[in-house]
Amino acid sequence: MRVSTSPDLFEDIANHPDVYPAVSCKGCGRISFEDAWARCIGLEFGDCGGFIYVHLEPGTWEVHTLFLPRTRGVDEYAEQSLRHMFEVAGAERIVTMVPADLPHARRFARRHGFVLTHTTPDGWERDSGPVDLDHFELSKEAWQCQQQQSA
């Protein structure tokens, strides 16, 4: 795992033709993280992708998962990134949003302990039309309990 100094890798992956349809919204054009990068921690795992954590407020970060298709080891990478955020970066709560048309992303969030807090009906606009947007969160306390149970 490497802490990224620029959004370049993440932008390349987000705009990759096999990834863009899953992470883009209607009419958004090329995805850029440049404007938000000063509020981000990017954790890279080789050249296949990683996680961007956006600082929302003291103790709260929003995570975005960006990997090339068929990348192996993403679950282990997620565990490493969560450990970094809770133990090194001082996160108290991590949130994420998952469009309802990405069931694999929903399963991924739940597998790592994220809990569904609410759904915004038609909250994500795709070129094909709106889809519901699920909101998840993971607290440091819940994450620590998971770590103790798996030890």
Image (cartoon, rainbow, N blue to C red):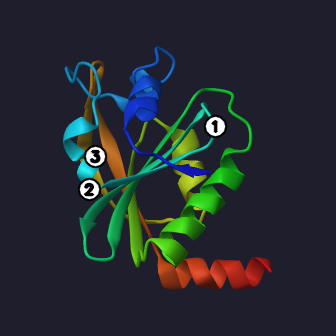
Q: Residue at x 63, y 85 (%)?
A: 145
Q: Are marks 1 and 2 in contact (CB under 8 Å)?
A: no
Which is more toward the observer, 115 or 58?
58
Q: Residue at x 40, y 79 (%)?
A: 92
What amino acid is found at the position of numbered circle 1 in the picture? Gly
What amino acid is found at the position of numbered circle 3 in the picture? Trp
Q: Residue at x 41, y 28 (%)?
A: 14
Where residue 80 appears, as percent x and y from the top left, is: 64, 60
Q: Secondary structure at mark 1?
A: loop
Q: Is residue 116 above or below residue 93?
A: above
Where residue 128 appears, as percent x and y from the top left, is: 30, 19
Q: Is residue 125 above or below residue 57?
A: above
- Taking the image as shown, residue 108 lies to the left or right of residue 128, namely right
Instruction: Tell me where residue 44 sits by quadrant.
Output: top right
Instruction: Tell me where residue 142 sits by quadrant.
Output: bottom right
Residue tagged 3 = 37
Q: Which mark is residue 32?
A: none
Q: Are marks 3 and 2 in contact (CB under 8 Å)?
A: yes
Badge 2 crowding class, 10 Å Cα cut-off, few under 14, some 14 to 19, many 20 or more, is few
Where residue 54 appears, as percent x and y from the top left, is: 32, 55
Is residue 24 visible to us here?
yes
Q: Residue at x 77, y 77 (%)?
A: 150
Cα distance between the residues tagged 1 and 2: 22 Å
Residue tagged 1 = 46
Q: Which mark is residue 39?
A: 2
